[in-house]
Image (cartoon, rainbow, N blue to C red):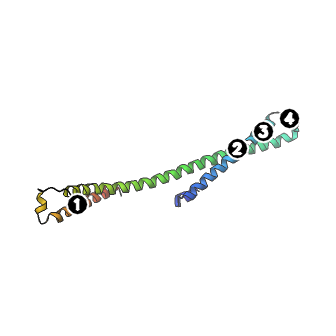
């Protein structure tokens, strides 16, 4: 499951991990009462169990203890896999948010410039100038390119 999280982190893998975790909890709930019962049989003398058979119950008790410890370990590992899955999802979302932030940051100054020149003022010197419109487009392109170069230099994308 950990390998499939690294290669293709999908909801199907997440569902598999959840299912496995539920199975482990179910198994532990089924095995734990056996541990208690066998512990009482091994530690206390019972009239129903012969002395020669106590060693077999003791061996069975050791196996049950090992099984419950293994189930606890596997349950912790599946919890770790769930955390790993969530971390991978958060990492991907952070990458998307960073890209959207960079795009927004590039377009904010361009929107500001377009907003100023979209106002209906009568006395704007650039409006009567022949090259005013191309110059504003050139300035907007220069701002956009300089911001992209800056973000590339800072390795933001």
State which tag comes first along the sequence, 1 or 2: 2
Mark 3 neighbour class, 10 Å CA radius: few under 14, some 14 to 19, many 20 or more: few
Q: Position of residue 99 (x, y in %)?
A: 37, 57
The answer to the question of whether label 1 and label 3 lie on touching residues, with beta carbons closer than 8 A, is no
> Hey, which quadrant is residue 109 in on the image?
bottom left
The label nearer to you, 1 versus 3, is 1
Distance Cα–Cα, label 3 vs label 2: 13 Å
Q: Which numbered disc flags the more N-terminal residue, 3 or 4? A: 3
The structure residue drawn at horizontal position 66% and vertical position 49%, both measured from the top left corner, is 24
Q: Residue 42 in the image: x percent, y percent?
A: 80, 37
- Residue count near mark 1 (Cα–Cα under 10 Å), binned few <14, some 14–19, many ≥20: some
Q: Is residue 71 left or right of residue 125?
A: right
Depth check, mark 3 against mark 4: the one in front is 3
Quickly name the residue at label 4. Answer: 46
Question: Can residue 107 be seen in this snapshot?
Answer: yes
Residue 140 image label? 1
Q: Which mark is residue 39?
A: none
Q: Write down the residue under mark 3.
A: 37
Q: Residue at x 77, y 37 (%)?
A: 39
The alpha-carbon separation of the residues under discs 3 and 4 comes to: 12 Å
Instruction: Name the residue that disc number 2 marks.
Output: 29
């Amino acid at each position: 499951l950990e390998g499939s999280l690294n290669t293709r982190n999908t909801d199907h893998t997440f569902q598999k991990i959840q299912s496995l975790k539920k199975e482990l909890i179910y198994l532990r709930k089924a095995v734990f009462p056996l541990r208690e019962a066998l512990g009482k049989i091994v530690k206390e003398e019972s009239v129903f169990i012969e002395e020669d058979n106590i060693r077999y119950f003791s061996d069975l008790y050791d196996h049950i203890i090992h099984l419950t410890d293994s189930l606890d370990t596997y349950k912790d590992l599946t919890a770790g896999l769930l955390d790993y899955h969530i971390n991978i999802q958060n990492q991907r979302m952070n990458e998307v948010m960073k890209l959207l932030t960079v795009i927004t940051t590039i377009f904010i100054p361009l929107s500001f410039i377009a907003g100023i020149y979209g106002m209906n003022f009568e006395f704007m010197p650039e409006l009567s100038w022949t090259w005013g419109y191309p110059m504003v487009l050139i300035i907007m392109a220069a701002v956009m390119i300089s911001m992209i170069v800056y973000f590339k230099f800072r390795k933001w994308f």
